[in-house]
Amino acid sequence: MSYRKGMMRSHGGELSFFHRMLDVAIVLGTLWASAKGYGVTIGLQYELAGMLAVFCFLFFSEWHALYISWRADSVRHEAWIILSIWGLTCCVLLALGFFSKSSIHFSRVTIFAWAMITPILLVGERILLRYVLRRFRKLGFNTRSVAIVGGGRNAAQLVDVISSSPWMGLKIKGIYDDMENAQQDNHLPGLDIETLLQHVQDKLVDCVYITYPMQQEEKIRQLVERLADSTVSVHVVPDVFVSELLHARWSSLGRVPLVSVFESPFFGASMFLKRVEDMILGSLILLLISPLMALIAIAVKLTDPGPVIFKQRRYGLNGQVIEVWKFRSMFVHEDKAHIQQAQKNDPRITPLGAFLRRTSLDELPQFINVLQGRMSIVGPRPHAVAHNEEYRKLIHGYMLRHKVKPGITGWAQVKGWRGETDTMEKMEMRVKYDLEYFNNWSLWLDLKIIWMTIVGGMRGKNAY
């Protein structure tokens, strides 16, 4: 049987529908297999649970755009999206089972097996499909013809990425620009804009990537208007300025469209989900660690006179000053205009305090702050007010850390940037990871950070 190039692409809608049906078959088939494997008869309750799971999975899949083309994205990212969707589906089913008191009608072993095996099969199916499609693309099938408009660093980076990733199935038709700039010094043909428009009209180009700097707004607008009279996909590649617009998203003020450049990732359902996460996990963790906290409190009181809990003034959400609780670890602990960070062999630290700080046990009272709503379990670590005022003038984007609640643990901490920041580079790296968390937040990223904290602790050679 022979295949013509582009045949699979022309049936993208049918493939997307097939993909959805395959996911439905996996969800229902795994439930049926789990029940049969444990000797459970599938009755009306199981059928309703299966259909509800399918509905929720497809609903959340559309919400997360699971069925768009993933050819240019990593399998790890797609796997995280699938796990997030299935996790949300399971949460809905568990909540309904709890409130309707219908969970007694289900086998726990069957439901547990279903919940564990289904995401493995869903991810495995994606990996297998990617492998098959990549083999086709390397042979020249299922490809997309790409035109790059403009030049400079953006265009060069785009060429490099596409050329080094043949599995994407993207073939560069040429580099297009104004007549005087059309000649390219690479091995790709340099063509002018009129040739591009002719290629688009002749269906020789599927995607157009515009790499002009944003300062050339008029040129971009004119080209987009001319390309609007076609069915080609058009993408504008942001330059350095636009790339730094943190967590930009489309919104509106009445009928006026807006681009929200500096905005918290927690709004609407995300804000509610984050708070539910903090309340549920915070309550469970506090219940588990309460005996340990009692022992630490007694030890602090017996080893040194003074208060057990030290309350520090820190910046919280939106830069508002909050009190953060810690077990006292120093003989003298300032919270004044000038704060000296703890250093190696710091004489202010008590012997017990050194152990508490090294193991992060002094942070445990902050779970009370989480339930109070001042902090979150995961988020940027709160800095002293004096340090905030100092570094906000020196590090670009520093105050964006405060668009979310401060956390007990964070992405920077599990990546090793914990403790004393005695150089500008250390603080810049901490802020870099804080903003990376800010831009890429998801429930599963929070759970990943919590797991990394439990397994490896908050790493950092500078923690004293």
Image (spheres, grey):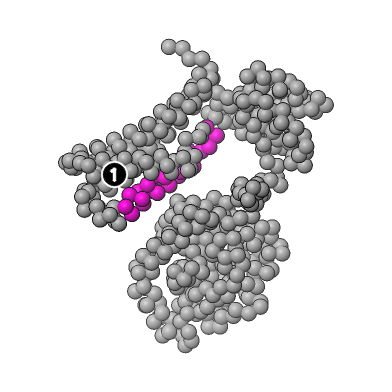
Residue 130 is at least partly visible in this image: yes
Q: Classify mark 1: residues with Cα within 10 Å, few (<14), some (14-19) or many (20+).
A: some
Relative to residue 308, is residue 160 drawn left or right? right
Q: Which residue matches tag 1?
A: 49
Residue 196 lies left or right of residue 86; in this view the side is right
In this picture, is 419 found above or below 38? below
Q: Please identify the quarter of the rendering in which residue 204 is found.
A: top right
**Residue 254 x/y as whole percent:** 63, 51
Q: Is residue 432 above or below residue 359?
A: above
Instruction: Work out whether 279 lies above or below 173.
Output: below
Residue at 64% from the left image edge and 52% from the top image edge? 253
Q: Is residue 139 visible?
A: no
Dot 1 amino acid type: Ala
| Residue 127 quadrant | top left
Q: Which quadrant is the N terminus positioned in?
A: top left
Q: What residue appears at the point 52 percent right and 61 percent down from the top-left corner?
A: 379
Q: Secondary structure at mark 1?
A: helix
Residue at x 71% of width, y 47% of height:
241
Question: 272 above or below 156?
Answer: below
Extent of the magenta region: 71-96
Nearer-the-camera pick, 171 or 255: 255
The secondary structure that dominates the magenta segment is helix
Please give left or right for residue 394 compared with residue 449 in the image.
right
Task: Report x, y in % for residue 210.
Answer: 69, 33
Depth order, front residue of 400/159:
400
Residue beneath the point at 62% across and 25% down: 231
Residue 408 position, x and y percent, is 49, 65
- What x and y, as percent, mark residue 426? 62, 60
Specify the farthest residue to the top: 1
Residue furthest bottom as drawn: 305
In terms of depth relative to the viewer, which is nearer, 340 or 314? 314
Asked whether 77 falls inside the magenta stretch, the response is yes
